[in-house]
Image (tube, rainbow, N blue to C red):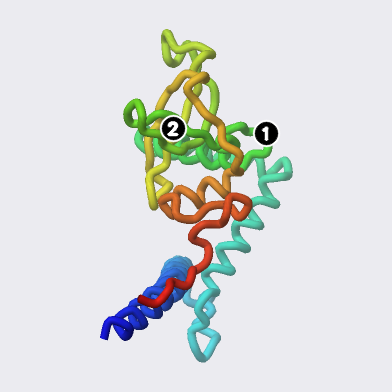
Amino acid sequence: MKRHKGFFRRYFITGFAVFVPIALTIYIIKVVVIKLDTVFRFLPPKFHPDTYLPFHVPGLGLLATLFLILIIGLLAKNFFGREIVRWIEGIFKNIPLVRVVYTAIAGFIKALFSDNSEAFRQAALVEFPRKGIYSMGYVVGESDSELFPGLGPDYVKMFIPTTPNITTGFFILVKKDQVRPIDVNPQEAFKIIISAGVVTPDRFGGIGEQVNDQPES
């Protein structure tokens, strides 16, 4: 009986570890595709693909969104496109509540994807939320003494993401000598944080990236 119990436990855990990541990945992709398919609702019926197709094709909204982003990027690179972007930004920045949300999101996106930005380029450890406990985060820049009086160049700004939702977290100011840089790139750091430290880069052993067989009891 004990042997059968160990057999069931071993293969159930193995199957669970294989099934759940696949199922969740498919579910997330499905949700994204369904949400992006709704972009066609804002178009007149004569421009909606379902008007001309005998059946609904999932994913057209995703392709349309990616194509729209590409077109916006191409337009924003020329003179007239840049003027249009500035005009739109001016509208957003002149609306009180919208200005706060827009400038914060725009600054975050530019810092995340800019090749010249140092934000989110260095992963590091810092004692947070108290001494003796370390959290992983990103150095996003040096402190501004005018913005933060008394905290000069000896301090840096850090963002500490939460697990598993890395879009939320804590913004802290900490002394440089209390920051411990670690040898991982931003993508590897994201992987570690999202998995709550279970998944690590291959060169450190790749813990959690594959299901290990467990001996039968």
Q: Mark 2 — residue?
A: 94
The answer to which quarter of the image holds residue 95 is top left
Q: Earlier in the sequence, mark 2 or mark 1?
A: 2
Residue 79 is situated, as x and y percent measured from the top left of the image, at 72, 40
Residue extending farthest to the left is: 1
Q: Mark 1 — residue?
A: 116
Residue 48 got which mark? none
Pointer 2 and pointer 1: residues touching (CB < 8 Å)?
no
Identify which residue, 181 or 105, lies in the foreground: 181
Residue 161 is situated, as x and y percent measured from the top left of the image, at 42, 42
Residue 191 is situated, as x and y percent measured from the top left of the image, at 51, 52
Identify which residue, 139 or 15, lies in the foreground: 15
Q: Check the picture and name the quadrant holding the N terminus.
A: bottom left
Q: Is residue 156 visible?
A: yes
| Residue type at numbered disc 1 | Asn
Residue drawn at 54 percent across, 26 percent down: 141
Mark 1: secondary structure: loop
Residue drawn at 54 percent across, 79 percent down: 49
Figure check: 167 above or below 198: above
Residue 51 is situated, as x and y percent measured from the top left of the image, at 50, 83
Is 110 left, or right, of 159 in this rendering? right
Question: How many residues crowd mark 1 within 10 Å: few (<14), some (14–19), many (20+)?
Answer: few
| Residue type at numbered disc 2 | Asn
The answer to which quarter of the image holds residue 181 is top right
- Calculate the distance from the C-alpha at mark 2 to the C-alpha at mark 1: 28 Å
Q: Check the picture and name the quadrant holding the C terminus.
A: bottom left
Identify which residue, 199 or 47, lies in the foreground: 199
Question: How many residues crowd mark 2 within 10 Å: few (<14), some (14–19), many (20+)?
Answer: few
Residue drawn at 62 percent across, 33 percent down: 117
